[in-house]
Image (cartoon, rainbow, N blue to C red):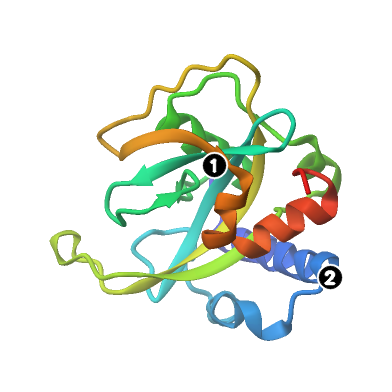
Amino acid sequence: MSFDPSAFRAHVGAILDAHARAFDVPDDRHALLRSQIAAGDDIHSRRTFPGHVTTSAFILDAEGRRILLIHHRSLARWLQPGGHYEPPGDLAGSALREAVEETGVQGLAIDPWHGVSGLPVDIDSHRIPARPARDEPEHWHHDIRYVVRAGAGIELRPDLREVHGAEWRELSALEGIAPQALRNMRKLGLAAP
């Protein structure tokens, strides 16, 4: 399957525009990502600086009351599972792949709302510290985020090469991690109030 960086940039730009309309996002919120798209940067590549596309998954239980978080090995924080986009896959599939890889949970599924809307629940650009051992300067992750559903009775088997652990937390934990995403999920009725 071939991959067209130009088509990917156009696709991400269209998602940005639709997401901004749906969630009343100010124009300047994604200024860096928009400028990289306009400049023709290879935003699909993890070697593109000052930033590149990542995806992540908010794994919710069936009732939307708890969230499955991982303790990120390099950032030493509890976060939602996620990672670098890998062409040629779709963005939602990338988020789902990361969720399964990092938590070891089988049977996860992208929330049906995404299929209907064609949108992510949130898009966030955040700074990542330099990692000289990997020859990575300080840079930005343009994180495209999806809600993923977990069935009942799942077994956690986190990949301890990538994360320190995984555990269910109260949904309110997202207030300190991704407050805009939590507001969007509640607005849409995807998460408990």
Which residue is farthest top? 153
Q: Residue type at mark 1: give it.
A: Ser
Residue at 48% across, 29% down = 100
Looking at the picture, tell me which residue is in the foreground, 156 or 49. Answer: 156
On screen, residue 67 above or below 177: above
The residue wearing badge 2 is: 21
On screen, residue 5 above or below 111: below
Q: Residue type at mark 2: give it.
A: Arg
Q: Which mark is residue 94?
A: 1
Residue 169 horizontal side relative to residue 190, left or right: left
Q: Earlier in the sequence, mark 2 or mark 1?
A: 2
Q: Quadrant location of residue 116?
A: top right
Q: Could one spot residue 85 in this view of the protein?
A: yes
Q: Position of residue 126 (x, y in %)?
A: 47, 70
On screen, residue 51 above or below 65: below
**Label 1 neighbour load within 10 Å: few <14, some 14-19, many 20+:** many
